[in-house]
Image (cartoon, grey):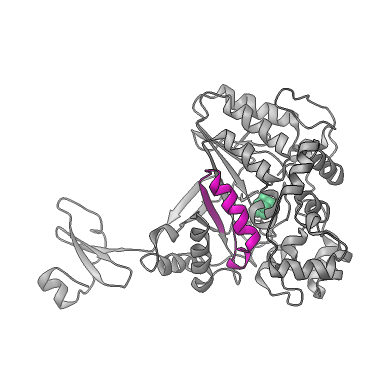
Amino acid sequence: MRTIGVLETVSAETDEPPSPKTVSPSTSRKNNNDKANRLIHRGAGASVVGIAEARRESFPTGKAARQFQRKYFPGVTAQDWNDWRWQLRSRIKSLAELERMFKLSDDERDAILRHKGSLPVGITPYYASLLDRDNPDDGLRRTHIPVGQEYIRTPGEADDPLGEDHDAQVPGLVHRYPDRVLFLATGFCSTYCRYCTRSRMVGEAGGDYSFSKSQWERALAYIESKPQIRDVLISGGDPLTLSDDKLDYLLTRLRAIPHVEFIRLGTKVPVVLPMRVTRALVRMLRRHHPLWMSIHVTHPSELTPEVTQAMARLADAGIPLGSQTVLLKGINDDIEVMKPLMHGLLKRRVKPYYLYQCDPITGSAQFRTPVSKGLEIIEGLRGHTTGYAVPQYVIDAPGGGGKIPLLPEYVVGRDGEDLLLRNFEGGIYRYKDPGGTVGADRQTPDLPIALAADGLGG
Ligand code: SF4
C-alpha cells in the first residue's frame, strides 16, 4: 500500500497456512492467484468457530452497495455480501464482468485487453458499487479501471522509482532507514490501484516478487540479526488480505523479536473491503499492541457506513489509525475534495497522516499534479481547519532518497532581529529572534506601514 500495499503467494507455496507453531519452507514457485485465493479463504475460515463467527458479523450496507448488489448480484444473500471471502472470490477481473456492470469507453476496453502481468484489474463488488458506471472520467473509476495512458512512459518515470529493489536486503524486505524496515508480506491486493507505487510486484508478478513462506523466514531472520531495527512496517500488497492465522503468525514472530518495539500495518482493505474488519480480526490484532495502522484513502465518497464501521472496530481495539492519501490529478486535487476527506477521517478517529505526491511510476502521468497543487492544498488546510486535519505533504524522493516533507513558504524574510512570518490569511508578523539567521538570505518584502511602525503587522 502505498502502501500503500497483501500475499496471495505466501499461500500459493503450500496447501497449509502457516501456524504460530510451524512454518514449512517449500521449494514450489507456483504463482497462481486463484489457488492462492482458495488458500487464503481456507486459512481464514477453517474452523467451525470461525464460520459461526462470520454468521454473527453484522455490517451496515450503504445505499450504493445495496442497489449495486440487487442489480448485479441478485441471488447473493446479505450474509455473503458482507463476507470478505465472498467479496474476494467475486472480484471483478475480466472484460466481460466489467462490461456487464460498466459502460466502458473504447480506451478502457483496449487497455483492459492489452494488459499482461502485474497490476491486473481487480475490484471488489463492494468497491465497484462506489464507481460511476457510465462516466469514464469519474475519479474513483479512473483509479481502478485502466486506460491507454497507463502504457505510456514519460520522462522521469520508472517501474521502481523509489529504488526499493536496491534497498531490499533479502527479497521482500526493504531496509532503507537505519532503525526501520518495510516488510512486503504479500503481492496480493483486494483491489488494484492504477497508480500503485508497487505496480511491478502486485497481482501477477513473479521472480523475486513471488512472495512465499520461505521468503518470510529469510526476512524474519534478517530482522532478528539486526538489533537496530525497532520499527517494522508490514505492507505489500495488502497484509489485511492475509488470513487471520497467517497475519497472527507474522505478528507473533515479529513480537517475539526483543528489539522490535513497534509494528505498523499499511492497508487499503478497510476502505475497499471493509467487511474484512471482522470482530475476530480485531481481537487478534489487539493481542499484538503496540500496533498502528496506516489506511490508504482517496476520496470522501469512500467514507461509507461500511467503512465507518470498519474504522470504528479498529479504533475501538485501540489501534491508532493514520491515513495515507495519494494526490491524484482530477480526482482529489481540490481543496473542496480534500477538506471533507480530512474532516471525514477525523470524525472516524483516523488522523490524516501523509499526503503523497504521486510517485512517478511508469504510466502515471495521467495522475500526477504539479507540486504546487499539493502545496496549495496544504495552504488551504493549514489555519483554515483543525490542525489534526492537516496531513504532512511529502515527496518520496526517486532513487531511494526517502520521504521529503514540503510546506508552503511561511518565512518571508528577516528584518534585523525580527523574523518575518506569513500567517494563513497572508498577514505578515514579526517574531523576535535574536541571533537567528533564518530568512536572512531573503529579500525583506515591502512591509505594510503599520507593521514597520508598531511591529504587530497583519
Ligand atoms: S494496488 Fe493499491 S492497495 Fe495494492 S499495494 Fe498498490 S496502492 Fe496498495
Between 222 and 5, the residue placed more toward the observer is 5
Image quadrant where residue 413 sits? bottom left
Residue at 16% x, 50% y is 435
Image quadrant where residue 130 sits? bottom right
Residue at 19% x, 76% y is 448
Residue 374 at x, y percent in the picture = 48, 65
Please report the bounds of the magenta region as a residue range: 297-325
Residue 395 as seen in the image, left or right of residue 276: left
Position of residue 235 relative to residue 420, above or below, is: above
Between 223 and 290, the residue placed more toward the observer is 290
Residue 282 at x, y percent in the picture = 62, 42
- Looking at the rendered structure, the number of numbered marks drawn on it comes to 0
Residue at 70% x, 63% y is 61
Magenta span has 313?
yes
Residue 297 at x, y percent in the picture = 59, 58
Magenta span has 443?
no
Looking at the image, the residue that sits furthest to the left is 453
Between 221 and 21, the residue placed more toward the observer is 21
Between 44 and 37, the residue placed more toward the observer is 44
Classify the position of the C terminus by image quarter. Answer: bottom left
Can the viewer see residue 170? no
Residue 116 at x, y percent in the picture = 83, 55
Position of residue 246 relative to residue 115, above or below, is: above
Residue 5 as seen in the image, left or right of residue 100: left
Position of residue 319 relative to residue 129, above or below, is: above
Image quadrant where residue 222 sits? top right
Position of residue 218 relative to residue 371, above or below, is: above
